[in-house]
Image (cartoon, rainbow, N blue to C red):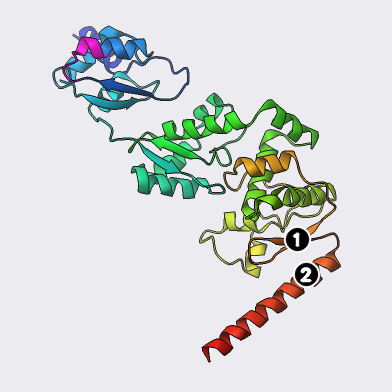
Amino acid sequence: MAVVLGVCILWLTWVLNTSAPDFGGGDIVMTIEKGMSLEQVTKMLDERGLLRSRTAFKWAARLMDVDRRIQSGVFLVPRGATNVEILRYLMRPMSSAVDVTIPEGLSIRQIAGIFQRQLNIDSTAFAAACADSFLLRELGIPADNFEGYLFPDTYNLYPEMLPEAVIYRMAANFKRYITDSLITKFARRGLMLHQAVTLASIVEGEVMKAEEAPIVAAVYYNRLRKNIALEADPTIQYILPDGPRRILLSDLAIDSPYNTYKHTGLPPGPINNPGFRSLKAVAEPAEVDYIYFVAQGDGSHTFTKTYDEFLAAKQKLQKIRREVAEQKKRDKG
């Protein structure tokens, strides 16, 4: 009896939990027409490389009483799913796809929030999936999470998609933009891909006007070359638990490897997900000698070569701000 019971358990485990190898390529969108039989659905799944055994899948469908309750509609089935998981997906037709725009410069946490609001994808699950080591290896991402590699773009996605499926789409899109030519240009500047993406994320966090991106990139290259701390405010925003907000003097003392006021060189990884503009700026920085810049409050910057020029530009800006504040008080009075 024990032997028979053991064999039955092994058989059930095989029937329910067997899965086809995951060779990558993202999730499969399937359309099941009204009236299709279990045999037809099984054949379609097998032809798309989603099954290890047609027989096991059909047995799983019968055991779960799904064989007579096959629904019509559009379904998203992930590669590498077990028979049980596939059958569960086939019980949940997807809603219509929607366009979701991810702007440049958002962190994983912020992107997760967008997907939570617009696609009902659990933000915690999405953030956790962004550290999936298998997915990172499969996509060839040289990091321990996907920060920096979720390419900003507009994506046509389905509500309640698996976080891994969305991440696959975004990271695969990133790799389409990172050409051999771009990687070669990074290398000529002495940067590996991860370092280049990290620097691009800082540029993304600083720049509002597109024409300034190559200049800001050049400033950071010049500071790295001279072993001067980058002192990049976006890296401070990244480590603030209650950010983004106005940076305080006490924030500059936060003990973190991402604090570029305390540590020279690049931080350990990207602080957001940069767009192509910033990546290109890191590959093709401007040929300038600037070491400092001051934000003007309108999205532009004043660039300087010396610290004295930097202080003068900063004092000029502070004077203008005081005059504006005083004028507002007079207008209210």
The amino acid marked with disc number 1 is Phe
Residue under numbered circle 1: 293
Residue 127, position as x, y percentages in the image: 46, 42
Q: Residue 313 carries which label?
A: 2
Instruction: Residue 75: name its quadrant.
Output: top left
Of residues 35 and 52, which is closer to you in this image? 35
Residue 173: x %, y % from top left: 53, 32
Query: Is label 1 in a helix, a strand or a loop?
Result: strand
Q: Please tell me which residue is depicted at 81% across the width and 54% down the height of the picture.
A: 228
Assign the N terminus to one quadrant of the image.
top left
Q: Which of 96 and 269 is in front in this view?
A: 96
Kindly identify the residue that appears in the image at 57 percent across and 83 percent down.
328
* Range drawn in magenta: 34-41
Instruction: Please tell me whether residue 50 is drawn above or below residue 172 in the rendered image.
Output: above
Q: Which residue is drawn at 53% across and 24% down?
A: 138
Q: Position of residue 236 (x, y in %)?
A: 62, 58
Residue 247 sits inside the magenta stretch: no
Mark 1 or 2 closer to N-term?
1
Q: How crowded is mark 2: few (under 14 residues within 10 Å), some or many (20 or more)?
A: many
> Residue 110 appears at what percent x and percent y?
48, 50
Classify residue 147 as left or right of residue 292: left
* 40 in the magenta segment: yes
- The vertical placement of 63 against 271, above or below, is above
* Left or right placement of residue 94 versus residue 168 in this view: left
